[in-house]
Amino acid sequence: MPLTVITTQGVFTPENEKKLVPQLSALMLKVHGLTGNKFMTPVVIGHLNTVSPELIFSGGVPVISTFIEWKVPSFGFGTQQILNEYVEEATNIAVELSNGKLLKKNVFVNVVHAVDGSWGINGKAYTNIELGEAIQTNDAY
């Protein structure tokens, strides 16, 4: 399940840039009760993009900000409780790793639900049902 993080350059130290995606990924698995799942763990993949401070805007004005976006199947982040927990904890992780450079109000989290059958993993297109079965069997893909 791909994670994209976009942030203003310089918000995180190089060391903390390397921590951000792994911590957000671990949190995603945790809130879904999938920590250590042999199928899910390696398919939770993400990247961090840094953008010049002059090129991220809020209300048309440059702002130091971080965007956290997941693309998941329709059952991912399937309850408001899971969303609430993830958004709160992910925001806290980003703010903490910024060492005071990032304000909570400038961390944005969203989830995009992908089209059923669009999960290409190891050369196989998985449907939501097949993903659910693979997660339940807890076998490496």
Image: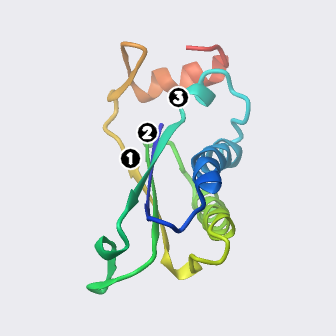
What residue would you read off at disc 3? 43
| Label 3 neighbour load within 10 Å: few <14, some 14-19, many 20+ | some
Residue 64 % position (x, y) = 45, 77
Viewer-proximal residue among 124 and 81: 124
Within the image, what quadrant is residue 140 found in?
Answer: top right
What residue would you read off at disc 2? 73
> Closer to the N terminus: mark 1 or mark 2?
2
Q: Is residue 39 left or right of residue 114?
A: right
Q: Which label was assigned to residue 113?
A: 1
Relative height, residue 127 to residue 23 (above, below): above
Element on which disc 3 rests: helix
Relative height, residue 36 to residue 58 (above, below): above
**Amino acid type of disc 1?**
His
> Closer to the N terminus: mark 1 or mark 3?
3
Residue 121 % position (x, y) = 42, 20
Residue found at x 67% / y 68%: 92
Q: Is residue 98 left or right of residue 70?
A: right
**Amino acid type of disc 2?**
Pro
Element on which disc 2 rests: loop
Q: Is residue 53 left or right of residue 87?
A: left
